Amino acid sequence: MCFGYVGRGFIAAVLALVMISSTAPANANQKQVAELETLTISIDRVGLSGALVSIALDKTGSLAPPADPHLAGWYEGGSTPSGVGRTVIVGAVDFKGETGVFWELRHVIVGDRIVIRSGSNLAHSIKTFLVTEVTLYRKSDFPTARLYGNLSYQGVALVTDGGPNESRTAYLGNLVVYAQLQSRVLLY
């Protein structure tokens, strides 16, 4: 049996597979791996990408997107992007006539993949989440208990404004995209 010429792409893929692990190696500094800093979020099929920052509740006790509409924020009072549970991530759909980081979220469908990349001095993590549900809620029916409830698995919920835009001053609803961890790759 002859395999013929093996190109660089194939060799690189084999080397990448050798480096991939779902758990940290025995000699890795577990503290550094646990403290991965979240860097980016993306959904390739719809062209969504942006930086992620941690955010807290505002003075009214609400979770608002970061002041910069080009950033998405994960709620630091809930599950972290590297922990078990549902990480709630909010982002602006638009702001003062400008498109926000979650502008394309309205085009996401069940089966799309959300990629969250994190890194530290020791490791780089690439987590892929499979979209399981896309729901538009009225503001009065916002699913607070569901979003912040306990999960036995790792998931994310992406939240932005949605529905009709009443007189271009306020959206009447919230779009929530739910996803469950599909894969995790740690590179050292």
Image (tube, grey):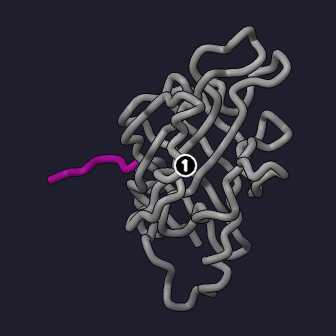
Q: Main secondary structure of the magenta part?
A: loop
Task: Identify which residue, 125 or 105, lies in the foreground.
Answer: 105
Rendered location of residue 42, percent (x, y): 59, 40
Q: Residue 102: which quarter of the image?
A: top right
Q: Which residues are magenta?
A: 1-7
In the rendered image, the residue lying farthest to the top is: 167
In the rendered image, the residue lying farthest to the left is: 1
Residue 65 located left or right of residue 30 = right
Q: How many numbered discs sit on the rendered protein?
A: 1
Q: Say few, some or many: other residues with alpha carbon within 10 Å of mark 1 (under 14 / 14 to 19 / 20 or more).
A: few
Residue 72 located left or right of residue 183 = right
Rendered location of residue 101, percent (x, y): 70, 33
Name the residue at 50% across, 90% down.
26
Residue 149 is a magenta residue:
no
Q: Is residue 13 above or below residue 186?
A: above
Quadrant where the C terminus sits is: bottom right
Residue 137 located left or right of residue 119 = left
Q: Residue 55: which quarter of the image?
A: bottom right
Q: Is residue 160 above or below residue 154?
A: above
Rendered location of residue 138, percent (x, y): 54, 28
Name the residue at 44% across, 54% down.
13
Name the residue at 84% across, 38% down.
68
Q: Which residue is mark 1?
A: 144
